[in-house]
Image: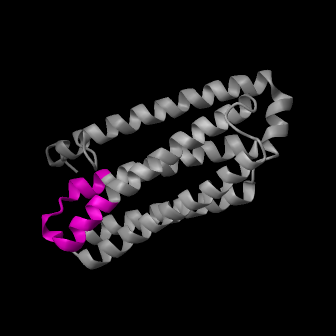
């Protein structure tokens, strides 16, 4: 490959656009700082964190991990099908990605109700403060992601020829960010 055949525009404008990647970077830094603070308090209050962690439902969290990863796969398939101009299949996979997100929210809500009923609220202890803040902030991102996909999906169903690949890729990048954040939160909060 010759240097003059490199598409520099693709290097400077990643899928979804540079603005989406700036947003993703800021979100990852925010969650990263939250996890650093969590790690500090985990070292200071190790017994409390260990006892509190045992009150979480790792089974539901594992199911949610599976749902988000599967949903991410469906999102990637939607982009792939769109690029091959198979708009009906792209819409189908986009819909499946949204269903995965909705199921994630349903299961997380069931988990939240159980925690509240057991008295494990935001103020129960430092572990649950982090649990509620980190998972709640993530849940908001999943909900926003579903809205983004819903808007794109509606356009894809009604007027697929008007959908820009950059918009679909931006939605996919945001959706995969939600996956990545959960893959950071899941082991830290539920397993270690």
On screen, residue 178 above or below 105: above
x 48%, y 60%: residue: 101
x 23%, y 51%: residue: 1
Q: Position of residue 27 (x, y in %)?
A: 44, 35
On screen, residue 188 above or below 93: above
Using residue 142 as the reference point, say whether residue 11 is left or right of it.
left
Q: Residue 169: within the magenta?
A: yes
Identify which residue, 16 or 151, lies in the foreground. Answer: 151
Using residue 24 as the reference point, say whether residue 158 is left or right of it.
left
Q: Is residue 172 visible?
A: yes
x 83%, y 31%: residue: 48
Q: Position of residue 81 (x, y in %)?
A: 30, 72
User: Count the marks: how many?
Assistant: 0
On screen, residue 101 above or below 50: below
Q: Quadrant of the C terminus?
A: top right
Query: What's drawn in magenta, residue-wise?
Result: 150-170
């Amino acid at each position: 490959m010759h240097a003059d055949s490199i598409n520099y525009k693709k290097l400077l404008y990643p899928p979804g656009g540079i603005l989406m990647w700036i947003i993703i970077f800021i979100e990852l830094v925010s969650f990263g700082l939250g996890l650093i603070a969590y790690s500090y308090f985990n070292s200071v209050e190790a017994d409390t964190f260990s006892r509190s962690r045992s009150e979480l439902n790792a089974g539901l969290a594992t199911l949610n991990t599976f749902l988000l990863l599967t949903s991410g796969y469906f999102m990637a398939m939607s982009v792939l099908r769109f690029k091959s101009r198979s708009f009906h299949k792209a819409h189908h996979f986009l819909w499946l990605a949204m269903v995965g997100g909705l199921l994630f929210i349903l299961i997380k809500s069931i988990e939240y109700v159980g925690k509240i009923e057991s008295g494990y609220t935001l103020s129960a202890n430092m572990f649950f403060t982090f649990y509620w803040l980190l998972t709640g902030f993530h849940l908001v991102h999943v909900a926003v992601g579903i809205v983004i996909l819903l808007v794109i999906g509606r356009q894809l169903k009604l007027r697929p020829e008007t959908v820009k690949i950059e918009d679909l890729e931006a939605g996919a990048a945001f959706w995969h960010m939600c996956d990545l954040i959960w893959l950071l939160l899941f082991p830290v909060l539920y397993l270690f």
